[in-house]
Amino acid sequence: MEEKNSKYILGFEKPLVELENKIQELKNLSEKEGIDLKEDIQRLKDRLRRLEENTFKNLTPWQRVQLARHPARPKTLTIVELIFDEWIELHGDRLCSDDQAIVAGLGKINEHRLVWIGHQKGESIKENLSRNFGMAHPEGYRKAKRIMSLAEKFHLPVVSFIDTPGAYPGIEAEERGQAEAIASNLEKMSQLKSPILVIIIGEGGSGGALGIGVGDRVLMLENAIYSVISPEGCAAILWKDQSKVEEAAAALKLTAQDLLKLNIIDGIIPEPRGGAHRDVEQTASNIKRAILREIETLKAIPLEELLIRRKIKYRTMGKPRGEVDE
């Protein structure tokens, strides 16, 4: 595990971390004392590999929730910086202010020029406070809508990165029209005359995710989650018992694997073994490949047909794959 992530160890990761530390100790001892410990080190490495395979092949929904929320998981701006050849961030909704919980701008990947938007969590406690933990205010959704209008005007595809616990529920957000802002974005994206690719990179929480989440193609990272409510909220409402969060996570069918079966999403982007935080560059590379593949496919579809397909997609959502009649 990378040193910068060492203080964020999830419960089910502890046996893996202990083995990794033992391997490192043996390596240090071998170098310091000049002792040949290659066989012992290799034996531990083989054991670690088997333990990793067993652990991450059988993750529970709640464990995937934990991975989706991992503090070191790559954020939107990190991904944008790694995958775009050129990019610029645009600010403000031209009505109220510049919401730091949603970022947006223009960019270029290979020969493709496009518009990008996304939720942005902080990399530190201080930044999380300024970014409101990725929970957007109405001005954030209005900024996203303004940037999407630019995409439509200049015939550019839109890539949306989702990573939020939900829209900000505070009174000031309600005073400034939170529900209207999200509803307006749903209307805008459902009719936007540009291809839209949505990628859930972490948490996809409720209306906060949907506010920038309507697309022609919706993909999820392997350990991302997407749900109408958090497991904690579900446990509080149904059981009035926070000890039921694991049961709630399973019942909500919030994993990428469940949602693909239910025809809610269109594909899963693989993560490095252990989660996206284990190898951020590899995660970004996987996302980049998915973007290039999907954008090329979507751009080849005539606009009129694309809008019809988008309409059908959302009218048949939730119907198991193989049962959708277009």
Image (tube, helix red, strand yellow):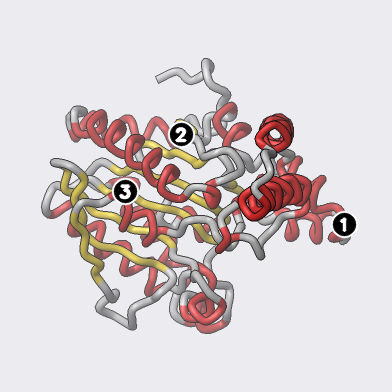
Q: Earlier in the sequence, mark 2 or mark 1?
A: 1
Residue 302 in the image: x percent, y percent? Answer: 17, 29
* Mark in the foreground, 2 or 1: 1
Look at mark 3 in the image and give the residue it sits on. 159
Quadrant in which the C terminus is drawn: top left
For residue 40, side relative to residue 273 (left or right): right
Q: Earlier in the sequence, mark 3 or mark 2?
A: 3
Give the residue drawn at x 46%, y 31%: 267
Give the residue drawn at x 53%, y 74%: 124
Q: CA distance from mark 1 to mark 3?
A: 37 Å
Q: Nearer the viewer, residue 23 or 140?
A: 23
Look at mark 2 in the image and give the residue it sits on. 315
Residue 289 in the image: x percent, y percent? Answer: 33, 35
* Amino acid of disc 3: Val
Which numbered dot is residue 271?
none
Mark 2 Cα shell of 10 Å, populated few (<14), some (14-19), many (≥20): few
Which numbered dot is residue 243?
1
Residue 64 occupies quadrant: top right
* Amino acid of disc 2: Arg
Give the residue drawn at x 51%, y 39%: 271
Cβ atoms under marks 1 and 3 closer than 8 Å: no
Q: CA distance from mark 3 to mark 2?
A: 22 Å
Q: Nearer the viewer, residue 93 or 323?
A: 93
SS of the residue at dot 1?
helix
